[in-house]
Structure formats: C-alpha cells, structure tokens
Amino acid sequence: MSDDDNQKPYRLGRRPGEQGPRPLSSNQDRIEKLATGKTGTTTRQIVANKTAAAVTSNVKIGQQQWKITKDPLTVGTWNAQTLWATGKLELLRNEMKCFRFDVIGISEVRWTGKGETPSGDFIWSGEDTTHTRGVGMLLTAKAKKTLIGYNPISSRVITARFNATPFKLTVIHVSRVITARFNATPFKLTVIHVYAPTSASSDDEIEIFYDSIEHALTQTPKKDIIIVTGDWNGKIGSDNTHWESVMGRYGYGDRNERGDRLLEFAALHNPYICNTRFQQKANRKWTWASPDGVHKNMIDLVLIQKRWKSSVTNCRTFQSADISSDHSLVLCNIKLRLKRRCIKPQQYHRADVSQLKSQKVREVYQTRLVNRLQDIDTQCILEEHAAKVEEAIKEALQATVTTTRRVKKPWISEQTLNLADEKRKMKQIKNVSAENGQLYKNLCNKVKKSARQDKDNWIQDKCNEIENGLKIGNTRQAYSLIKTLKKNFVPRITMIRNQDGTMQQSKEGVKQRWTQYYSGLYKDEGGGDEMVKELEGISPSYKEGPQDILYSEVEEAIQTLKSNKSPGSDGITAEMIQAGGEQLTHEIHSLCNKAWHKGVIPEEWGKSILIPIPKKGDLSECANYRTISLISHTGKILLTVLLNRLKRHLDPYLSEEQAGFTQDRSTVHQILILRLLAEKAKRQEKKIYNCFIDFQKAFDAIKHKIIWAVLKSFGVENKMITLLKHIYEKAQSAVRVEKETGEWFQTSVGSRQGDPLSPLPFITYLERVMDKAMQINRGINISGTLVNNLRFADDIDVLEEDCDSLHQQIEQLKITAEEAGLLINTKKTKTLVFGDRNIEKHVQIAENIIENVELFEYLGSLLTWDNNCSDEIKRRIGKSIGAMAALK
C-alpha cells in the first residue's frame, strides 16, 4: 500500500505541510472559499465582497521555506438533472458563486445541439433534436481566457483543452537572505466530461460509451495532463483489493457490475479515482441520494492520470450545493494553475455614431473635421491622400463622440435568488423530518415558479419598450428587441474540422483553417478561354469618354449609403461620412477622380472582412456556413458612382426574363408570371415542364476574365473596365472569427461580397450564358412570343411545352454554364410539371437523375403541379403562427 493512500486530507483552509494554529474564525469564510469549500455567506454577500485575495501558504522543508503563491486548480462534476428549464442556467451560475472553482462538468444538460453561450462561460454537447442526455462545462472568467478549444464529441462526452502550468515556487533560505524563483514549464490540460448510461442500459450501449471516451483519449496529445470528470452511473465501492493502482482505500458503499467496468477502464488507461484518495466523513463521499435519503452511492467521480495523483490535495462532495438535483457537487483541488494565453485579442471599440444625429454634436464634428482636412495636401499621391482623409475622420470622431457600451442586465430577480438561498439551507435538514422534506419540495416549486414569473416580467418589459419605440418611430430598436425575444438561439461554434476530418480546436488553428478554406474557394482553377475568344469576336468598337466623375455623382452616392451598417477594415461608417459636411465630400470627390484617371484604388478600399454565418447541418464543417463581407464605406462611394454609370449603359441590353437586381421588378412579378402561365395551360389542358436550376455557389464561381470580356461585348468603355480590373485583381480578404482577423489573401475568382457593384456584372455575365444556351425557337408560346426561362439573379426556371425539348435545353445549358465556370447542383435542381404529377422521362445531368416533384418552393412561394394555392396559404398561416409562437 502506498504512502499516498495513507495520507490524510488537510482541513479546509489548510495546505499540505502547513504548521501553526488553525486560522482565526474571522478569516474562516474567506479561507474556506479559497480552499474549494462553501462560505458561510449568501450569494449576494459574496458578489458584493469580491475583493478577497489569494492566500499564500508557507511550507517549511529543512532550512527552506516554500511559498505557493496561487490558488490551486479546482475541477468538479455535477449532475444537474436538467438545464432545460426556465432560469436553470442562471441559478446554476448563481449557486457556483458560493464556491471557488475553475471548471465544472455538468451532466444531463438536456439542451439540443452543441456550442457555447454568447458569454462563452458555458459549453455543451447534446442530442440533435430531443431534450435528453447532454453534457457541458461551466467555466470561470479565468478558465475562459485559458481555453484553447473544445470538442463536443457526443451527447455523453465533451472535451476541453486549457493552457496550464504548475505552481511557481519561491524558495527562501533561512540561514541567509537569499531568494530564488522557479518558473515551471507551461503545459496543456485536457478535461473530459462524461455522462454514462444508466444501469438499465444495454451492454452494447455501455461499450459504445467507453469507446467514445477512448476515442477522446486517442485524440488528446500525449503530453497533456488529462482529467476525466462525470456521472459514471457505476458504484466502485470501498474495497480496493486488487485495484490499488486506480483507487484508494476511502471509497463508499458496495461495488456493482458497472463499477467493475469503470475499474477495468481505469486499469487500462491508468487514471486514478481522486474521490477515494482521502479519508472523509461519509457525507463528503456519497454523491447521489434517493428521494427518501435512505440509499446513497458514490457515482460522480473525478479521475486524473496516475502520475499526477500526488498533485491532488483534496476531493470531496459538497452537500450544501443545491440545484434541485438528487446528485451532489464534487470538487477536486489540484496543485496546478491555469495559464492565460499571452496573445492579446484584437479590440474593437465602436464609436456611438448615433450621437451625430444631434445638430449640435454634428456641428462640432464638422468643425473639427474641417480643421484636420485643411492640413491635407491634395496634390499628394492617392494612397497617402486616402490614408490622411481616413485619419482625419477618425480623429475628429474620437474627439467628438463616446464609445458604445452594452450592459447586460440579469433578468432573474433578487426575490428568486433569496428563495434559492432558503432552498439551499433547507436541503441540509430536509431528511430530519417529513415536514422538512415537504418544506424543501415547496421551496423547489417556489423557485421554479418565481423564475418563470421573472421571465414573464422581463418579456413584458421588453414588449413595453417595443411599443414605446414604435410610437416614436424607432423601428430599428423595436425590431432589435423583437429578435431578443425570439427563441431561435444560435450557439457560438469555436471549433472547425480540418480537411482530413480532425477537429481544430485552437483559436489560431481555427483562423488558419478558415483562411485555408476561403482562399481555396476563391482561387481560379483556370478555363474559360474559349468563351473569352467568342466574346471578343462580337465586341463592338467605341470611343472613350473623357468625362470626370462629377461632384453631384459623389454627393448622390454618399446619400445612398445605408446607415447602421458595420464598417470595413478602416473602421469608418456611413454615418461618419454623411455627417462630414461639404468639405469631406470635396475630399472624397478628389479621391474618386484620382482613382478614375489612374485606374487604381487605395489598398484599404479593396479589403474585405469575411464573417462566417452558420446555416444548417453540421456546424463544424466550413461548407455549412455562408459569409457576409465588410468593405470600406469610402470605397463604396466610388463603386456606387461606377454602378450608376454601368446601369445606364447595360440596362437596355438585359432581357425581360431577368428580374433580379432590376429596377421596378421583384420576386412577386416572376411568381405571378409563372402562376398565370400555369393557369392558362390548365384551361387549355396543356402541360408546362419546369426545371428549377440551382448553380453551386454561383456568385463565388464566376471568372474575372470572362466578366471583362462580357462587359467589352456590351460596349463598356476601357477606362471603366481597367478600373474594375484593378479593383478585383488587388482585392484582399481576411476571415474574422471571434473578433480576431486572420491573414489577408487575394481572391482570383467570384464576385466581391458587400460590393454594391457586384450584382450588375453578375447578371450581365449570366445574360451571355443564357443567350448562348437557350435556343430562340423553343419555349412557351404566349401570343406569338416564346418564353423559355424566367430568372431572378441565379434562380432560373427553364420552361418547355414537351419533355424532349426540356431535356435538350438543360443539356445545352449544362455545357454552356460549365464553359463559364458554373456547375449545376444536381441535388437541389428539381423538375415540376404543371398539369401532371409525374414526368414521362426524368432529366439527366452528367449521369445524375434529376428528381421530379409535385411541389416546389420558388422565390419563397410554394408551387404545386395543379397550381393549387391552398398549400401556399396554409404554409403562410403556419409561418405566421410560428413567428408568434417564437415570441411567447
């Protein structure tokens, strides 16, 4: 038997080897909290007295004195039974304020999906749809800063990795005045939290559970310190005969079959069960009690690698902790500490530009801006001129307005927290008598009822704010508050899969993975030369227009900038420019003309910040995200001027079938046309064959060299094309994840997201593709006019009166689209026949059979084979009911 097993635990508030009297009672509460224990104060008193400092302990060894200068690492486990109840997470956070901890594993979370809360203090992994099982971890502010990443493996296993280090020790030699400080080498700490199947589960389910833990262990780097916490649903008992290597002599109760399986797992992977290491009173050992308090077991355990068991200084149960669960909180002290990452995150302090709405503030801003703009030499080069204007805007704004601050107020009331305190105290004596047991149940119900009432009051307050906002015309605030009331919470996902399928957890690695994905997505793979030659053959000759960019064009473009939009990498918003006055407009006009004549733009105007937005499916896959792009608002002014000029030139050449990005046209027009065609065919007892085409990432696939050839074929002047070429060739993008921006990379394919100019070249590009693909003598005959397709941007419906003609049209469209770099998504492309449930012969694209459907959602409207609108009406009613239900 090892000496470690004979070691007795030191008393709360005492370090191993500490000599001298027990701390005075006046300091007892503070010492208890620092040593993992619960203080004698209420939660509110703890929050009000957060100034407690770390206690240093002295260890005398021979003629030397060792000082431990930091609190130990404290990890724990707790089965909360459920967090899927109103206010349960807030009550958990509130309860844990009574204890000193770093990481707490939570079992039976019962949340769906996986991710982390917006505050980042709670991570979880649950089932996809059902509110069962689920594991999570509650982190302190310190633990959040040291978190490298996490991996939600399943609804029973989750892992998290932290930066850590042993204690820093100061050695003081008694006989001489000599001190020496030793810096321990940092390392990584992996915490695995599990929730085992119950004893009623099958052996196969148990083996799957242990396989998933072994999988988590194999994915963990070998140099990491590994701690496994969780509800194991297995009794290991108190007899450690033949199991001395994995458990101590101080277990609890008897062993069962699930406990044998746990000990076998421990013997195989060499973790040590910390709960059994120290001699404790019985109520500090058992972690679960039956409702009547008769049956008690030790099933919530903390395991650590055997070579680190000597670092464990205490591991015990805290019966005083209360979250309305039949399980008790287990906390374990380890002589390690979390180490904060040295990487300083990029800070984004947004100025409160809404203050510029005030006439007085705007005048001060304009005066300060004019003073700074007067010092700029307008004859300097374009890059320098743009940088000085940007600097002048920022300095004037910083000297005029303050930064915005978002203060999140807790919705749970003081009354509910007081009831939770009473419930916690009553838990200690609930088994003394039946009356006390009933009082405890009543308090549990009161806490639940009070939490629900708090939530209802919070919702009512928000509704009042919405009504008051609408009364004064503040629709932005009203819609913002409505979003906060909706239940469609989207968790943050801070891990992503690599190309080889492994999970990338570190923040730096996640940024690199996103950069790798998007730089590959926006890389031109070649091709398209044949189409360029064809377009050059039909390009007309034209004369260059020497006209400068007019001041009125710049002024109009500034006024069309949309407010309340995030800035680009330069940090300048539309409100800053619009409030800048006439002098700033003159400076921007000068910059635009310099860019126009030189055929180049400032580097900052070509930068785009990409922000991934989750869609559906597995959110650890990069492909299941769309992006929004943030570009310079100053650069948008020049792009808007170019857009207006291009519109006047290209509008006459665009076909009537295209309604996307076209003035006075919308989705309603296309839906109406299609329904009228279906109604007419129904009256004449004819069929109309539809093929709804979906291109794979159409906006991201168009080739730049074909764009320029298309514009030339429509007679766009060279000066315009030269400037657009430079904008696209010099464009740079970077991915922003968790407020940190990755490396900049160049894009060589696709249209620029966020660019007001991009949609027009795209539909012009598509115009040439459809001109070549669609045969003139085919389509639906409407009073002598043939209509063979309807378009809304890249949403295309190919129309034919017979099945064979549809096959021919789709085959030709596939060939032409591929020449232009556009690939048809055969999984999302569908056929629908107005007038028949079935199609005589399925359309085939590259050996892939296109599914024929009886109903299809086109541009937001549900179309059916018999053109019956009843399904669409029911769907819209259902959506409205769903929208109202989300606010309840």
Image (cartoon, rainbow, N blue to C red):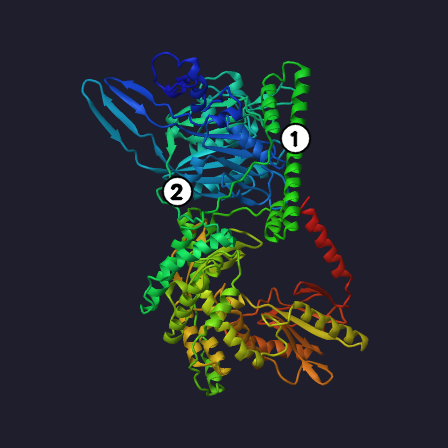
Dot 2 alpha-carbon crowd within 10 angstroms: few under 14, some 14 to 19, many 20 or more = few
Closer to the chain start, of discs 2 and 1, is 2
* SS at circle 2: loop
- Name the amino acid type tagged 1: Ser
Residue 672, horizontal then vertical, whole percent: 71, 70
Dot 1 alpha-carbon crowd within 10 angstroms: few under 14, some 14 to 19, many 20 or more = many
Q: Is residue 505 left or right of residue 692?
A: left
User: Where, by quadrant of the figure, is residue 464 drawn?
Assistant: top right
Q: Nearer the viewer, mark 2 or mark 1?
A: 1
Which residue is at the far left? 176
* SS at circle 1: helix
Please give the residue where the numbered disc 1 appears in the rendered image: 450
Q: Residue at x 52, y 65 (%)?
A: 559
Q: Nearer the viewer, residue 391 or 744?
A: 391
Residue 128, horizontal then vertical, whole percent: 60, 46
Please give the residue where the numbered disc 2 appears in the rendered image: 221
Q: Is residue 675 left or right of residue 89?
A: right
- Name the amino acid type tagged 2: Pro
